[in-house]
């Protein structure tokens, strides 16, 4: 951008006002101050878990971005342990959340059965399997009051069970393809404002439903991030009387469709004329003109800043209520989103590049443990549950395969060493170590190889020059972590 905006002026322009500008005003000095608020031994802290869908690591100031405005995420990062290279153990939405809620790896998707009635079914996309204990259930058995608020509509479909273990679960209606309002009320003329020449029919259907769902939106408080984080702030009023509590705030934006209030988009592009590319095809980006692709990036960036503003509202409320003084707060994203960097937009299965795989992961301890530190440990989604349970001194069930990350808060190493990491997305796999990264199909074909030290943006595929490295990483990392050959689903 050719202009600079201070954090205070940005929040004011975005409508946050004095409350937003006061973020963390009374809780910056982490340290001994917090100890007097914790129960003896710190064993019954509250837990706040914030999940932000589709948030790219490279779009957050705390991770090095210099042009996208995320002042509240940046402020939170300063008070947190920041993981510099977290990755989901699997993706997308439902797969990542299964890992978060159960502490168990979803990949390599063995014994996966598509859900009847579901329209989107990448491998591994299914409810929490019977017999897997959830984080919420364990905490409930140990005296926690649990609440979930989310606009991620997949969680609340009749054939899913992500609400188990929660005393309160609130569904903010209307996101994406949620059959909330009658889609036929939106005319083709209205839809034409958001359709591009190359859009497939799936995009038409999503846009029509989304426009119907949001037709009554008038001011910023009607938008989804405002309702989710605003609703979470309201829940805190009652939860502080029921401590210890476990609150999950699962925010779907900046997932597409991208339609934030205009002032957020104008931060990144205020000169575009044409149909708004709010919903991408999951496909090569060559159906977009340069202007449309630039606008798509501006819409996503505006959505990110909009989410950040309402995250700030929630954090301010938690601070004002004194809740942050005795609450462990973990914030992470489930995956990113392609915006044309490698010739793709959306989340195509084969596009396992940094824009899709690189996520955000922060842990804020009320005593300031780990504050201001960075860790290059390969933190992941299935580490969330064992980390939380260990931090509140609750035994971790044996099913949970993730790593307890809490020793890192003390400057120590976790018990589980990770010299590499692997993940899966439908029929595609990904693996990396300190030097190299591969991704390709589950059977070892179509593999790409990158030197992440010399080429972190993954521009130069070395697979043809070093097939031996590809074979070694596929066998020693992918197949070994998977426990043998990967399953195939037609």
Image (cartoon, helix red, strand yellow):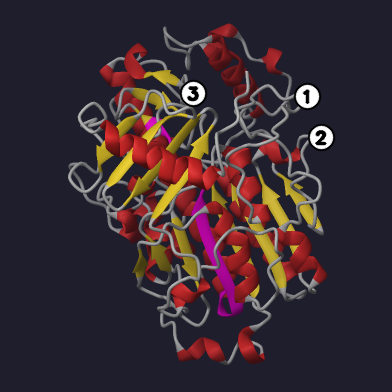
Tell me if I can see residue 273 in this picture: no
Viewport quadrant of the C terminus: top right
Give the number of the mark in front: 3 or 1.
1
Viewer-nearest residue: 369 or 6: 369
In the image, residue 198 lies at what x, y percent? 42, 8
Residue 281 placed where, x, y %?
A: 47, 19
Q: Mark 3 points at which residue?
A: 279
Against 397, residue 431 (above or below) is above
Mark toward the viewer: 2 or 1: 1
Q: Residues within 10 Å of mark 2 (few under 14, many from 20)?
A: few
User: In the picture provided, is 54 more to the left or to the right than 436?
Assistant: right
Q: Residue 89 carries which label?
A: none
**In this rendering, would 282 be left or right of 297?**
right
**N-terminal-most mark, 2 or 1:** 1
What is the secondary structure assignment of the residue under circle 2? loop
Q: What stretch is highlighted in magenta?
A: 324-338
The structure residue drawn at horizontal position 76% and vertical position 56%, both measured from the top left corner, is 133
Pick the front one: 262 or 100 = 100
Spatial CA distance of label 2 from label 3 is 25 Å
- Image position of 430 (left or right of 151): left
Tell me where residue 248 appears, x and y as whole percent.
65, 57
Q: Contact, CB < 8 Å: mark 2 with mark 3?
A: no
Residue at mark 2: 158
Figure quadrant of residue 397: bottom right
Is residue 335 rendered magenta in the image?
A: yes
Q: Is residue 101 visible?
A: yes
**Which mark is nearer the camera, 2 or 3?**
2
- Quadrant in the picture for the N terminus: top left
Q: Residues within 10 Å of mark 3 (few under 14, many from 20)?
A: many
Q: Residue 116 carries which label?
A: 1
Q: Position of residue 77 (x, y in %)?
A: 40, 65
Tell me the residue at 51%/75% (across/down).
Answer: 365
């Amino acid at each position: 951008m050719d202009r600079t905006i201070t954090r205070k002026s940005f929040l004011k322009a975005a409508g946050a006002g004095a409350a937003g500008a006061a973020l963390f005003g009374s809780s910056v000095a982490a340290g001994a101050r917090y100890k007097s608020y914790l129960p003896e031994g710190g064993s019954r802290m509250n837990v706040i878990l914030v999940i932000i869908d589709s948030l790219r690591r490279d779009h957050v100031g705390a991770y090095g971005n210099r042009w996208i405005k995320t002042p509240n995420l940046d402020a939170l990062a300063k008070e947190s342990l920041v993981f510099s290279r977290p990755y989901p153990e699997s993706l997308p939405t439902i797969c990542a959340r299964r890992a978060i809620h159960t502490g168990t790896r979803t990949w390599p998707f063995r014994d996966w059965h598509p859900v009847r009635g579901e329209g989107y079914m990448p491998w591994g996309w299914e409810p929490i399997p019977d017999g897997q204990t959830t984080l919420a259930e364990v905490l409930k058995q140990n005296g926690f009051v649990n609440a979930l608020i989310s606009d991620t509509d997949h969680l609340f479909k009749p054939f899913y069970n992500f609400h188990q273990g929660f005393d309160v679960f609130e569904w903010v209606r209307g996101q994406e393809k949620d059959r909330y309002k009658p889609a036929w009320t939106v005319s083709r003329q209205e839809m034409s404002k958001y359709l591009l020449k190359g859009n497939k029919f799936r995009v038409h259907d999503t846009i029509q439903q989304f426009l119907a769902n949001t037709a009554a939106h008038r001011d910023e408080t009607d938008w989804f991030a405002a309702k989710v984080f605003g609703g979470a702030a309201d829940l805190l009023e009652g939860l502080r009387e029921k401590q210890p509590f476990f609150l999950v705030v699962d925010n779907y934006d900046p997932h597409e469709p991208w339609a934030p209030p205009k002032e957020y988009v104008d931060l990144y592009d205020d000169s575009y004329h044409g149909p708004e590319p709010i919903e991408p095809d999951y496909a090569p980006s060559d159906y977009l003109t340069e202007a449309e692709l630039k606008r798509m990036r501006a819409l996503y960036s505006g959505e990110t800043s909009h989410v950040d503003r309402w995250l700030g509202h929630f954090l301010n409320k938690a601070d004002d209520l004194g809740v942050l003084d005795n609450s462990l707060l973990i914030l992470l994203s489930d995956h990113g989103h392609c915006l044309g960097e490698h010739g793709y937009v959306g989340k195509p299965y084969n596009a396992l590049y940094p824009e899709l795989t690189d996520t955000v992961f922060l842990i804020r301890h009320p005593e300031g443990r780990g504050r201001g530190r960075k860790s290059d440990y390969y933190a992941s989604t299935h580490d969330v549950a064992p980390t939380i349970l260990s931090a509140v001194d609750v035994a971790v069930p044996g099913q949970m395969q993730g790593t307890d990350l809490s020793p890192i808060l003390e400057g120590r190493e976790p018990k589980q060493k990770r010299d590499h990491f692997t993940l899966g997305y439908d029929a595609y796999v990904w693996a990396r170590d300190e030097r190299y990264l591969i991704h390709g199909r589950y059977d070892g074909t179509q593999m790409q190889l990158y030197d992440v030290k010399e080429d972190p943006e993954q521009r130069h595929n070395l697979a043809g020059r070093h097939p031996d490295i590809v074979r070694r990483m596929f066998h020693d990392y992918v197949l070994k972590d998977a426990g043998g050959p990967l399953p195939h689903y037609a």
